[in-house]
Amino acid sequence: MEDTEQLALFEAKIASGQKIEPKDWMPEAYRKQLIRMMSQHAHSEIVGMLPEGNWITRAPNLRRKAILLAKVQDEAGHGLYLYSAAETLGIDRSELLAQLHSGKAKYSSIFNYPTLTWADIGAIGWLVDGAAIMNQTALARGSYGPYSRAMVRICKEESFHNRQGYEIMMHLAQGTPEQKDMAQDALNRWWWPSIMMLGPSDDKSPNTEQLMKWKVKIESNDEIRERFIDRTVPQAEFIGLKIPDEAMKYNQETGHYEHGPINWDEFFEVIKGNGPCNAQRLKDRINADKNGFWVREAAIAYAAKQAKEKLAS
Ligand code: 3HC
């Protein structure tokens, strides 16, 4: 069948709400977009372990340490899940990781900021995982089967991440004046990077049109950002913290919050590699990959030995 006929069939399938599966015909541009998004998503998950991992040995008590350990392990699992989903498109994770380590591949801007106090762990769970849930619940309705299905489990775990983060912030905000100050300081530093992580404004988003046409993206960056802000501002007010945006106000008519200007120059600088922690994050990921080589080598050798014995039996 001609590609034009194949394309018409492909788009009709998507329009009828069917999922595209790995063995289905798909335009090269669809495959390329998915590899780009899914690999960056996977990279974000494993890089995202670093700022939080920094506080595992510094958690204020055993309960917090156990919760943070579970969250960081979840993120590792999300990364592996997403690399596996990306591999259904015919690319190997070793190639994706080489792109990350070479600095070629992107990962979420948000993980290039430092975690300076324990309250940052609360702010990340509350704001970063909160923003991620908004984005990922939309991706769970996307047209590519393996990606949308991967989101189901990831969103369930993100909800736990988000709740535990908000509980940390609530506990601090209702604690001593120093603890409340620490929580407010973390909110001041993580608020704007968290709304930027949902992507540039729609007028600066070259991928959105094609991704929405093929239902990889169900909502635009600005639509998801608006949902995140509408949900999060009341949560801050509920625990007595102040969103660091003097212009933030609720519009009774639209039912949405209106915020001040976003510093997109900062965003594009960070994704160009000039954020506070970009170099450190890449160095840590390269070291982790090097230090884990012997584990992968042993696991591959063991699997090969098992397969050989199975064949021989
Ligand atoms: N960080 C880094 N790069 C970003 C970015 C961000 N937050 N937002 C956008 N960009 C990049 C895009 O990758 C694109 O560059 P490219 O064409 O070279 O890849 C460019 O900026 C223009 O942006 P677009 O809006 O055109 O890009 P998209 O249409 O892909 O939208 C996105 C960006 C909303 C992040 C989308 O890619 C997406 O939904 N990705 C999947 C979800 C994801 O990656 N989430 C990251 C967070 S993971 C996480 O939160 C872990 C959790 O445990 C906390």
Image: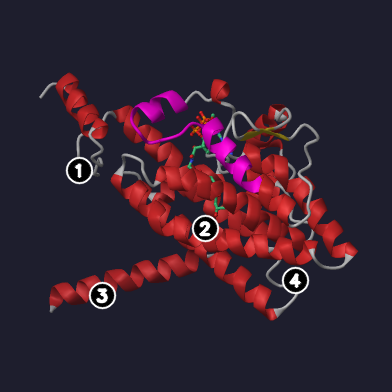
Depth-wise, is mark 1 or mark 3 nearer the camera?
Answer: 1
By secondary structure, the bulk of the magenta-drawn segment is best described as helix
The mark found on residue 276 in the picture is none
> Taking 114 as reference, is 162 left or right?
left
* SS at badge 2: helix
289, above or below 131, in the image:
below
**Amino acid type assigned to the residue bearing label 1 in the image:** Lys
Q: Quick check: can you spot residue 98?
A: no
Rendered image quadrant of residue 191: top right
Provide the residue designation for mark 2: 158
**Mark 3 belongs to which amino acid?**
Gln
Residue depicted at 24% across the width and 44% down the height: 21
Task: Name the residue carrying label 4.
Answer: 58
Mark 2 and ligand 1: say if the CB distance to the nearest ligand atom is below 8 Å. yes
Q: Which of the marked residues, 1 or 3, is nearer the chain's N terminus?
A: 1
Which is in the foreground here, disc 2 or disc 1?
2
- Amino acid marked by disc 2: Glu
Locate residue 150, reporting x and y percent.
37, 53
- Label 4 near ligand 1 (CB < 8 Å): no
Residue 306's mark? 3
Q: Which of marks 4 and 2 is nearer the N terminus?
A: 4
Q: Distance between the residues labelled 4 and 1?
A: 47 Å
CA distance for labels 4 and 2:
22 Å
Residue 250 drawn at (x, y percent): 69, 35
Residue 130: tell me if it is visible: yes
| Residue 23 marker | 1
- Asked if the stretch drawn in magenta spans residue 61, the answer is no
Q: Nearer the viewer, residue 97 or 51?
A: 51
